[in-house]
Image: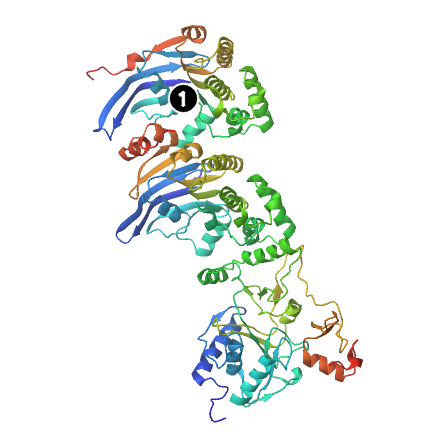
Amino acid sequence: MNEYNFAYLDEQTKRMIRRAILKGLAVPGYQVPFASREMPMPYGWGTGGVQVSAATLTPDDTLKVIDQGADDTTNAVSIRKFFENTAGVETTEETENATVIQTRHRIPEAKLTEDQILVYQVPIPEPLRFLEPRETETRKMHSLEEYGLMHVKLYEDISQHGAISTSYAYPVKVSGRYVMDPSPIPKFDNPKLEMDAIQLFGAGREQRIYAVPPHTQVVSLDFEDYPFEATKADHPCDLCGAEDSYLDEVIMDDAGNRMFVCSDTDFCRSRRAQGHEGRLSKEGAI
Amino acid sequence: MIELKDVSKSFTLHNQGSAVIPVMQGASLTVAPGECVALTGASGAGKSTLMRVIYGNYLAASGQVLVGGLDVVQAEPREILALRRETLGYVSQFLRVVPRVPTLDVVAEPLLAIGCDRQVALDKAAALLARLNIPERLWSLSPTTFSGGEQQRVNIARGFAHDYPAMLLDEPTASLDVQNRETVLSLIEEAKVRGAAIVGIFHDVGARDQVCDREINVSDFTPGVAA
Amino acid sequence: MTPLLQVNGIEKRYGARIGCTDVSFDLYPGEVMGIVGESGSGKSTLLNCLAGHLEPDAGQVVFDTRTGGPVDTVTMSEPERRMLGRTDWAFVHQHARDGLRMSVSAGGNIGERLMAVGDRHYGQIRDRAIDWLGRVEIDGARVDDRPTAFSGGMQQRLQIARNLVTGPRLVFMDEPTGGLDVSVQARLLDLLRGLVREMGLSAIIVTHDLAVVRLLADRLMVMKDGHVVESGLTDQVLDDPQHAYTQLLVSSVLQV
């Protein structure tokens, strides 16, 4: 522990990031620029989320890290180890017991509480980037609330695919003002963005932090005749039988056999511990 | 309806030593509704210039050109355009149209410009074209490819599509055969009957004698050589 | 009648160099005004000042807004000016790719202004896009094609549809027929004439092509070295030019 400052970052940097976080909370959905630091991991591995977590953690916190819902993937494991080493905080895989949850591409299935903070890793924070490459112009569009372009993207989706095919990073309007990229979470998770916990978003490479305070209105953009739908695979979990969780599809062999399992590993495990069963749980496949 | 008071016109050729060429002075005339006045004078005496001054195409140097109460010399462009749309028609010797527009639309355009119903406008255009012996198979083609005589008749049809209270006719019967010449002359007669004031240039003496009530020799307005 | 646009003493300088200076005119509803002059005469600078793309150093551009009456667009707030740019004003660029989103379908291009002003019904937006494709003589079946698959003339017509779909009252055009084949130009001019008449549009057209202004413009302004040297009725300026430069300009046109 002596070789690192608490949570790796120096105190000045943490102050700078906390100021950005507070500003983000004060202006929900607004992308606050910050001086992103070099972190001991490559861009794309969660450098933004790690910096936000580092500035948020206190010695009393319990940290959970998930990647695509799972606690046991490389990215999640390495970030968890990183904070075990540099901050010495408790870590957990149980959603209920965590006070800070860093996530990539998912919102946990369990309802989060006012005592928790959810930190998202964000690759591209600018929702308008797809159609407008100029940063000067997108900033102006945000400041003047010119969001017609966002619907052009959805229009293109429908005209090409017959439905809004955007299935992740689905744009939302926060508190009736800023259009925001909720990071590449599946649109199944979009309704959960209105929650009791604090949500912080960190984009390291793009040097932006934004936030959604608790109990903030978050509306998924749509058309009157093509309303937003939070879709998932039409299937129960093959392990725990859950019918209301977001599922991963797993190809099992070359014969085309496949199974659907909860992407939230903690949620699935706790259900099975309660005795819930799915189609394949008897076979002891996992 | 048309009244000129002491109008003069000169051209200043800035790029040719700023030579000032006076072409008209002291031009005064009056044309009442229902009257047709012929401009006469030798070639180069200024007949076409006078017509263009009345139409607002040439800017008079001094004097007043009153058409339907509007002084064309002083008027704003939009006032002149409104005058040309509603009051003052002009049949020039040359057809000037957007390429590739069908003949029927070319003739109907003055009516559409004043807000006439499209079908009514097209019907009237068709009637005029038929009267002037333009074969129906040509109506859907652009007149830019027509012979000189056909273009002239399309031009006349266009000029007579709307019942202008005042009209300027520049050689309306030139290059027409006997039958079409008669048609044009009767169009002019009909315009007079409905009360149009007409100023025309007719080299065709027979036509002039048939439709014109008076002649005005523009040589009277030509500045003296010494002037 | 209130002028739609009142321009008073517009000046734009680039350092010591004059872009355009002392430009004043009134444009009335339904009027089409041409601005001609050679390259560097300041006509494009003037157009960009009028359309709010450049901030003039002096002068007023007073537009008769639908709700608030005449307002100086130079001093109005940027959100208001940009809103005007999406609703009552339209700008047709010389190069269609400057005015279109090349990676978005024709329907999306036309629909953008509708969505920008709050339309949220996909079916209605699409129907209006197809209707407008028809009005600019593009097959409605191509609504989902991208402009990159269109010819130059079609791209220009698509740009016009995209601009006119919200029913603007004033259209700025910068060399709208530049770079097109002569035959394509003629068709575009005829289309523009028809649309201007049907919609009662006012337009300001910058071009160096005197044939274009003769066919489209009611009035003409001739510019040289940033100054307006002559203005008036289009055919009067072209047939009886008063200023030395205009006489030179008119006499320089090749007769076909």
> In the rendered image of this protein, does residue C38 appear above or below residue C147?
above
The residue under label 1 is: B67
Which residue is the extreme one toward the front? A254
The subunit letter for the residue under badge 1 reads: B
Mark 1 residue type:
Val
Q: Give neighbour class at mark 1: few <14, some 14-19, many 20+ (Cα, 10 Å).
A: many
Query: In which quadrant of the rendered image does the C terminus of chain A lie?
Result: bottom right
Q: Residue at x 50, y 80 (%)?
A: A41
Direction from residue C142 to residue B58 in the image, left or right? left
Q: Residue at x 27, y 50 (%)?
A: C17
Question: What element does badge 1 sit on?
Answer: strand
Which residue is the extreme one toward the left? B226
Residue A87, how many percent across, how many down? Answer: 52, 88
Residue B107 visible somewhere in the drawing: yes
Direction from residue C124 to residue C220 in the image, left or right? left
Residue B74 visible somewhere in the drawing: no
Where is residue B76, by image quadrant? top left
Residue C253, how many percent across, how many down? Answer: 34, 32
Figure coloring: rainbow
> In the rendered image of this protein, does residue C252 appear above or below residue B25?
below
Q: Residue at x 50, y 86 (%)?
A: A7
Q: Nearer the viewer, residue A154 or A258?
A: A258
Residue A38, how many percent across, how many down? Answer: 45, 79
Direction from residue A60 to residue B91 in the image, left or right? left
